[in-house]
Amino acid sequence: MSYDSADEDGGVDALTVLELLARQAPPGRFAELLDQARVAGRPESELASLERAVHLATGVSCSLARREQREEGLAALLDTTRDLTLPYDLDGLLRVITRRAKRLLGLDLACVTLRGPHGGRLLHSAEGALTAHDPASCPTLFEGDGLGDLVHALGEPAWTEDYLDDARFAHSAAIDELVRSEGLRGVLAVPLRTGDSTLGVLYGADRSTRRYTADEIALVAALADLAAVATEKAGLLDQTRAEVSELERDSSRARTRLTRMRYIGEAHSRIMNLILAGGDLRNVATAAGDALDGAVLVRDPGGRTLAQAGELPGFDEDAVAKASLDAHAGRRPVLTGSGTGERGYEEGAGDGDQTWVAPVLAGSEDLGVLVVRAATPLTGEDERLLELAAQSVAFLLLMQRSTAVAEGPVRDELLDDLLAEPQHAPQQIAQRARRLGLDLRKPHVVVVARPEGGEQGRAVVWASSYAYRMSGLKTVHGGAIVLLLPGVDASAAAKAVSGELSPLLGHPVSVGAAGPGWSAESVSRLYLEAMRCLDAMGALGGSGAAASVQDLGFLGLLLSDDHDVDGFIESAIGPVLDYDAERFTDLTRTLEAYFASGGSPTNAAEALHVHPNTVSRRLERIGELLGAEWQKPGHVLEVQLALRLQRTRDVLARQRADLRDSRSTTTAAQSCERPGG
């Protein structure tokens, strides 16, 4: 609009100012209007009036701009309020708050710090940062920040136009370095308040100096109040979610444990019903293996296998023996190789060997162990099932012992009749044995144990159970316990009896054995041999030992009724005789020459007309055949006696052959002298 046509009364000027104001013209347009009036040479009174109108219009325009800005801020705050009502976790909520704060005031950077559990203020979220700051690497980043301390102390907002040049508060080297690296100058700090407490601080910052107005501070403070409430609720929500998750996990664990306990109860009931229905140890071992998903081995205190279900490849005897000691000491199952502990095993042992050993106990009496090779790691509930399975095995063994005691008189009478000389009514004895499940035509051995220390009653009860368990017989003769057991190895039977009875009585028990025999008539003979073996051990100072007639070497040959010369020679020098027969060597003759020369290889070589090195090599071969200890005094004596017996037997055999030849010659000559011969 041109001022040349303006009315003198200035009405057009006022109208023009109002039109600019209505159009929300920028401040420059008002200044341009005033400049045009001056150029047109308007009177001073009109210029003053126009300046007054422009000044008032500018003020109204600024007020309108501030109101619009305030309305925009409130609208943004309202949008933020709606956003904060959405479900966020704490970190997500803080990111929303910093993003909104940055947009509200057009800030270069916004961040939030919250009070840490051990003091200090933890940086949780930053929006607009140029450098990377890991809150985990600087958990007390804002500790010592004067602006933050002031906000926490007063609970009111604080700001600075230029942070690094402001001396009103103490500076922290770490915070100054952060401000310097981000290039920040103007900083505003507003508390996150809930009631009388301050949860943290909302920071806004610019990379240029800036004076924050009261409206801006009030707007950010309102945002901070909303953020504080939302933050507190988000924290409570996170806590509630964590508690709900933990409750769900506890509920799941409880349901799983209840299911396992129900399964354990059912498995234990099946095992007990099996026992009550007359099942044997193998049936019980199979049922326990099915329940525990593994192979099961039942062993007696001497380590002998009583029953087995499934295969246990790579069985470590030493580890099982050590675990057995730990299990009996702690009276609970032990995982092999885990050592001892409060539970007897380690929770994290599931990646290794899952071989468990559970003690089979009846009060303080050791009945053996239950060994389980599990396909998968056992839980605490599985351990309970393992304990129950071991108790079931103990119950079955006690039932077998009770049955053995009940049948004891009948079985004792049969063995008494077998030991009698002469036996009466052999056919009747054979029928009685068959009724008790015994076949005396199969190999059997006789074991005689002499308990000492006035504990015969306890030993007799054990012997009844042991004989029943081994499908044998038991009786008491002359203060000694006599056992008739199936088998061919008398020495192993003696050691097995000693291995169980000695720990039960708490001291070594002398045990003698003889056998095997294959008929009812052989029982009394084996008994006499076993008794002579027992007496011989006592005379030789071997009380508390376990041995058979075969273990006594040549002494056992003398004690035996059948004088098994062939068996003695075979056990003493059999490998040497076989070697000579197969390879046509002279090891036997070398042995004889060696002993005849007083153990001198040189003298033996002269007698054999060979080089001394030849004798040395032959002696080395003999050592390989008879074992490294063949030249020890006891073995040497048996070897020499066996050589003498073998030489005597060869001489007698040649004499019998010569006698037969002589008789044949004489018969032939007599035939020729007869008339017509």
Image: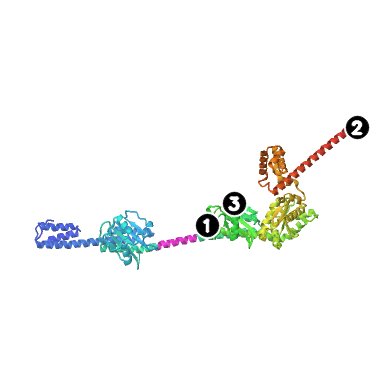
User: Residue beneath label 2, please?
Assistant: 675
Quadrant of the image occupied by residue 620 = top right
Residue 347: which disc? 1
Q: Is residue 10 visible?
A: no
Looking at the image, residue 162 sits to the left or right of residue 504; the answer is left
Q: Which disc, if any, is residue 573?
A: none
Left of 69 or right of it: where is 507? Answer: right
**Residue range of the region highlighted in magenta in the rendering:** 236-252
Residue 139, given in percent of the width and then of the height, sits at 38, 59
Badge number at residue 316 = 3
Number of numbered labels in the structure image: 3
- Magenta region's main secondary structure? helix
Q: Nearer the viewer, residue 91 or 416?
A: 416
List the single residue furthest toward the right.
675
Q: Relative to the observer, which residue lies in front, 394 or 620?
A: 620
Quarter placement of the N terminus:
bottom left
Element type at mark 3 = loop
Give the camera-side residue of 296 and 139. 139
Image location of residue 94, percent across then percent down: 35, 59
SS of the residue under disc 2: loop
